[in-house]
Image (cartoon, coloured by chain):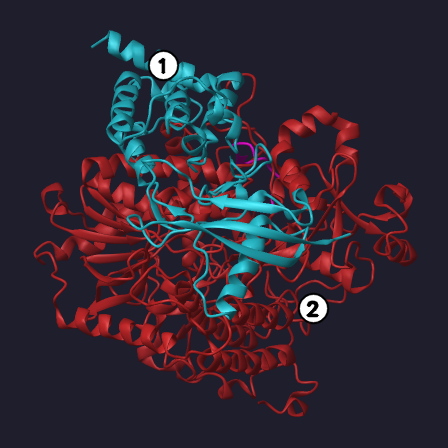
Amino acid sequence: MENTISVNLKIWRQRGPKEKGQFANYHLDNVSTGSSFLEMLDMLNQRLVEQGEEPVVFDNDCREGICGMCSLYINGHPHGPVQGITTCQLHMRKFHDGDTITIEPWRSAAFPVIRDLMVDRTAFDKIQQAGGYVSFNCGGAPDANAIPISKEVADVAMDSATCIGCGACVAACKNGSAMLFVSAKVSQFALLPQGQVERKRRARAMVAKMDELGFGNCTNTGACAAECPKSIPLSNIARLNREYLNAKFHD
Amino acid sequence: MTDLSKIQGMIDSTPIMKDYADVESCNKPEYQVDSKIPEGPVAEKWTNYKAHQRLVNPANKRNLDIIVVGTGLAGASAASTLGEMGFHVLNFCIQDSPRRAHSIAAQGGINAAKNYQNDGDSVYRLFYDTVKGGDFRSREANVYRLAEVSNNIIDQCVEQGVPFAREYGGLLANRSFGGAQVSRTFYAKGQTGQQLLLGAYSSLNRQINKGTVESFTRREMLDVVIIDGRARGIIVRNLITGEIERYAAHAVVLATGGYGRAFFLSTNAMGCNGSAAVQAFRKGAYLANLCFTQIHPTCIPVHGEDQSKLTLMSESLRNDGRIWVPKKKEDAEAIRAGKLKPTDIPDEDRDFYLERRYPAFGNLCPRDIASRAAKERCDAGYGVGTGNAVYLDFKYAIQRLGEDVVRDRYGNLFDMYQMISDDNPYETPMMIFPASHYTMGGIWVDYELQTSIPGLFAIGECNFSDHGANRLGASALMQGLADGYFVLPYTMQNYLADQIKVPHFKTDAPEFDEAEKGVRARIERLMNIKGTKSPDEIHKRLGHVMWNLVGMGRTLQSLVKAVDEIEEVRKEFYSDLRVVGRADDLNTELEKALRLEDFLVIARMMAIDALNRNESCGAHFREEYQTADGEAARRDEDYMYVAAWKYTGETDKPILIKEPLKYEAIKVQTRNYKS
């Protein structure tokens, strides 16, 4: 059955992008081990509000691991110490009574802090806008079964398409590279017949935008894939490199 | 407070309705609604409409601005398609990116009448199943159109690169959902909503890149601006800076989702809200059929008081999972006490109550029926867990198909379950219980998806139009995308055809001043209450009232009590709310307070609507109206109408407006999922 634990929280607080931040310490008792990590932060915020203090700001929405809104660098890991899940799927049963939990925002030049643990990830949208689509207008599509796609290819494309755009890969990377994020989208389209026509243009445009926005270079460390909450494999980056080289070769 | 002794034993609210609403004026000529259903047989209506509607030529489209609020399936598909057509679109969302809208969380799939499985499906059958599933409370013409365009949606999404599940031969795979005897549901693992939304988001990105769509993120709409009787703009709050901003356009589209968080705990995302609908309501748009709220049968049960949301386990699990509770009460008691495990109960002592009661559809009967059946067993003392849970068991599927096949089909859902509950569903049955999930009711719209305010449109979950009293599984994604890709882009042109000479609007009109003043006054009022309770505390209290009194089983007495208790919560809100921080700054507490203020309006309207509807139909179960074997008893002669409500004031009596429902293509009958 449910237990309760006490935890010490060390949380990064920062008023704005230009202001200096610092850690603040909080102690929380009676945290149910059945609660999610974000419910634990809700408890903290409820207490802060009761004391007339401003709550800790953090992005969150669906709380079931799919919207990509939640972030948090917990004890040195994006989305916490458990692999393959987002912060909102992390439960307090993974912590022990008396633990000290350090919570920081994503730290990357391309993701400036807005307040406390909330960062600005619009750079990701800009990369997608540069080429993450198949160009056709609504209404002009052929019958959905007109082009058979093998199950194996569809499944691999699906694995790439699973990316939730949370930014953990960038936060995990010592260079702040967005290669895993970009490669997941480029791979999805490179694998599917619908993506063939714009294959080269897409790889070129998305990589150029990524570089322009201040993301770092990939040095094949693999931290991104290890920390990805959706376990997007590193093979996507290899594919992106091939796609990009191929596109450059044709320039 | 109402004197409850006076209504004891009463089952029909007609004698007391005048205390809650103006139900007399609906016969007056000014309160007749025109649903603008085209002429002709149901199968030809949409074709006729498209053949005769007015169009806007490409050069003029550039000069027309359209605001789309929301970036879910409906909003993103509408914004991108209108942009592709050449209109100038301003698109808003409350999240940091359009890709985060809650459509992303839809798991199971999307219906379409492709008949790829050759199992007897057709546009007519999808239409029929949807009307029947909605318990004959939806508009025939709208539903037919929905079924008709469903096939185009699948074509569109495949072309976008949505990686739907496929068979080894390379063609698309299907599975079954509740309320259907065919396999017409297309899916992408348990992440169909995500893939469809990312598809719509990719089209949207293409338009943003082209400059036809301007994207405004982290903005929350706080009012709609009406100029000379037409919707011409919105007032939003910038959630990062706290600034109040104005945006003008020739037309405004709301695609803002449902109001399921009126129950506080729901499967909706934390930010889901009904505020845009309430703002439209205050400005004269009608809200319709609000009592039709879907309680989804398969959610992970509540664990405690600090819980913030509930997690859905996809309906697709009912393809292979079997739902049961112990046959013997003593077994149920022993399980609750922790003395027995579910695996200790032999098959002959398990009550597969859906298979028992509804042999023809079994575990795949519609959501409203499955939810009520679970509640019935738990209320009778057969519940497991805390008493409010039933089992969803995969033992039989694993025996029949092997663990690998089950893992391939549902692996990510099983992982999600294990993460939350700490139980392994491959070894022990899942525990599930119904929870608030979707709202069929919403903003009243005509056939063109236009509200009663000219120039204000509502699409997707936020309108009331297609699902009647109960939505079938995998139909929400279908409706959102149908509205956005294939319906609104046509009907919008019909509206804008005579607006081509209207120049771009400026935001310095007195109507904008007035609306902004109103928004500022509203915010100031909330900031200055300076009470002791956080918005979440009051919201939880509202949620308890709604779940207990306006939930799965409602009675005249519970609803009368609900109206009183909602009023109590409202008083607490305006006297004891505390919003910390400043208004002109990032302030998540203020965001919650503003949404809660609107939920209070919706909650009251849900209770009044439910009180007015003296019948049971679909998800609206008035316990007074049931058949001898516990099924919903409709009263078609008195209630075969859409109940639309007109705002008269925050606590004043709303005016009931009736839109009669006529069934010409379908013979109305009692829903039967037994044989």
Please, which chain is the residue tagged with disc 2 on? Answer: B
Secondary element at image label 1: helix
Please, which chain is the residue tagged with disc 1 on? Answer: A
Q: Which residue is mark 1?
A: A241
Chain B drawn colour:
red
| Left or right for A197, reference B100 | left
Residue at figure coordinates x 61%, y 34% from the top left = B412
Residue A242 shows up from this direction: yes
Secondary element at image label 2: loop
Is B183 within the magenta?
Answer: yes
Image coords of residue B107 (percent x, y) = 54, 41
| Left or right for B371, reference B94 | right
Q: Dot 2: few (<14), some (14–19), or many (≥20) neighbours within 10 Å?
A: some
Is B553 within the magenta?
Answer: no
From which residue to which does the magenta span run? B179-189
| Left or right for B384, reference B508 | right
Q: CA distance from mark 1 to mark 2?
A: 64 Å
Q: Dot 1: few (<14), some (14–19), or many (≥20) neighbours within 10 Å?
A: some
Q: Main secondary structure of the magenta part?
A: loop
The one of A187 and B535 positioned closer to us in this rendering: B535
Residue at figure coordinates x 27%, y 51% from the top left = B491
The one of B143 and A65 positioned closer to us in this rendering: A65
| Left or right for B233, reference B172 | left
Q: Given the current orientation, which residue lies at the most extreme top position?
A: A249
